[in-house]
Amino acid sequence: MQLELNGLAVACIIGDRPYERTLAQTLRVDLSLTLDAQAARTDALSDTVDYAALTENVRRTLVSAKCWMIERAAKLVLDVCFAEERVQKARVRLVKAGAVAHLESAAVVLEATRAEWRKGVF
């Protein structure tokens, strides 16, 4: 089963320019998670990922990390996803608006299975 959590807006310190190290910018986070389909069968909240807790952990991680690059920020979000035992595969997309002049946004996508993540692919 695919679980899509899209459009999480997180205000955080991100970037390498001097002004980016002091002014929070908004990252958009989109997650696509592969889980077993147990919740579809049981209709029980305990059989799926807690969306509120997961997105709060993502937000907290990005705010505290103060990353220089969105690539690193995406890796940290991937780690948060795999902290959830039910997640078998995760796709993380981070979008930073106005990252470069004349671009609407820049984005990074990381995708891994739990086995790849354990091996340290990212």
Image (cartoon, rainbow, N blue to C red):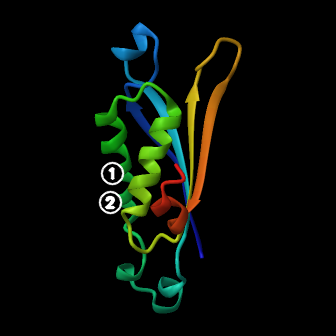
Quarter of the rendering containing residue 25 = top left
Viewed as shown, does residue 107 lie left or right of 23? right
In the image, what residue occupies the spot 55% across and 29% down? Answer: 96
Q: Secondary structure at mark 2?
A: helix
What is the three-letter code of the residue carrying label 1? Glu
Residue 2 at x, y percent in the picture: 60, 70
User: In terms of secondary structure, where does tag 1 sit?
Assistant: helix
In percent of width and height, residue 9 lies at: 46, 39
Q: How many marks?
A: 2
- Type of the residue with mark 2: Ala
To which quarter of the image does residue 10 belong? top left
Task: Tell me the tag on residue 73.
Answer: none
Question: x, y percentage for residue 18?
Answer: 40, 8
**Residue at figure coordinates x 46%, y 11% from the top left:** 17
Q: CA distance from mark 1 to mark 2?
A: 5 Å
Residue at 40%, 29% (x, y): give it: 67
80 w.r.t. 3: above or below: above
Where residue 56 is drawn, which disc sits there? 1
Q: Which residue, given by chain and number where applicable, does mark 2 sit on? A: 53
Q: Are dots 1 and 2 in contact, CB under 8 Å?
A: yes
Percent x, y of residue 102: 71, 13
